Image (tube, grey):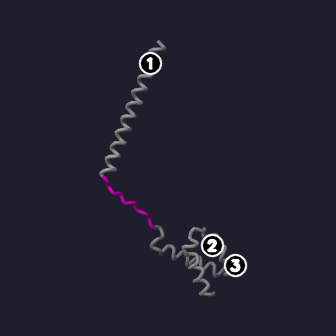
Amino acid sequence: MREDEIDKAVSFLRSDAVKTVPVDQRKKFLEDKLTEEEISEVMKRFSKLEQQSPAAGKQEHIRVVKSPAAEQRLKQTNSHFVINAINITSLAVLTSIGVNYMLD
């Protein structure tokens, strides 16, 4: 096996320029340049490096910052929601009473 070609191929698979390309398509690209045995070795090393990488499986954490203005806006939104819910409920009750009155 050509160790230098394997190293180049592993670097290629991990490069930022091709990270958005699916691994299967990256592997197909290598088929023109390497033997099946070399490709197997490249894929084995690539998988091993991806599992060891600190970025692999890294989860993004969202930092919540409390803002007095944001809390005030949230309270206003909640109070508007409650007022609208009461208005809708009142309208439904009045409509029901009106329909019952007209049907009687």
Instruction: Check if residue 96 falls in the magenta segment.
Output: no
The numbered mark at residue 26 is 2
* Most common secondary structure along the magenta stretch: loop
Q: In whole angstroms, how far apart are the C-alphas of marks 1 and 3?
A: 80 Å
Name of the residue lying farthest toward the front: 69
Measure how far apart labels 2 and 1 are at the Cα level. 70 Å
Q: Which residue is mark 3?
A: 32
5 up-or-down from 14: above or below: below
Q: What amino acid does circle 2 point to?
A: Arg
Residue 69 at x, y = what percent?
A: 32, 50
Please tell me which residue lies in front, 57 or 72: 72
Q: Secondary structure at mark 2?
A: helix
Q: Nearer the viewer, mark 2 or mark 1?
A: 1
Left or right of 56? Residue 67 is left
Which numbered disc flags the more N-terminal residue, 2 or 1?
Answer: 2
Mark 2 neighbour density, 10 Å: few (under 14) some (14–19) many (20 or more): some
Q: What span is colored magenta in the figure?
A: 58-67
Q: Position of residue 59 (x, y in %)?
A: 44, 64
| Mark 1, residue position | 98
Residue shown at 37%/31% (left/top)?
Answer: 86
Kindly identify the residue that appears in the image at 45 percent across and 67 percent down. 58
Within 10 Å of disc 3 (Cα), the crowding (few <14, some 14-19, many 20+) is: few
Q: Secondary structure at mark 3?
A: loop
Give the amino acid at mark 1.
Gly
Per the rendering, the mark at residue 88 is none
Residue 22 x/y as whole percent? 60, 68
Q: Identify whether 79 is placed above or below 28.
A: above
**Residue 61 place in picture, x, y as percent:** 40, 62
Q: Residue at x 68, y 77 (%)?
A: 31
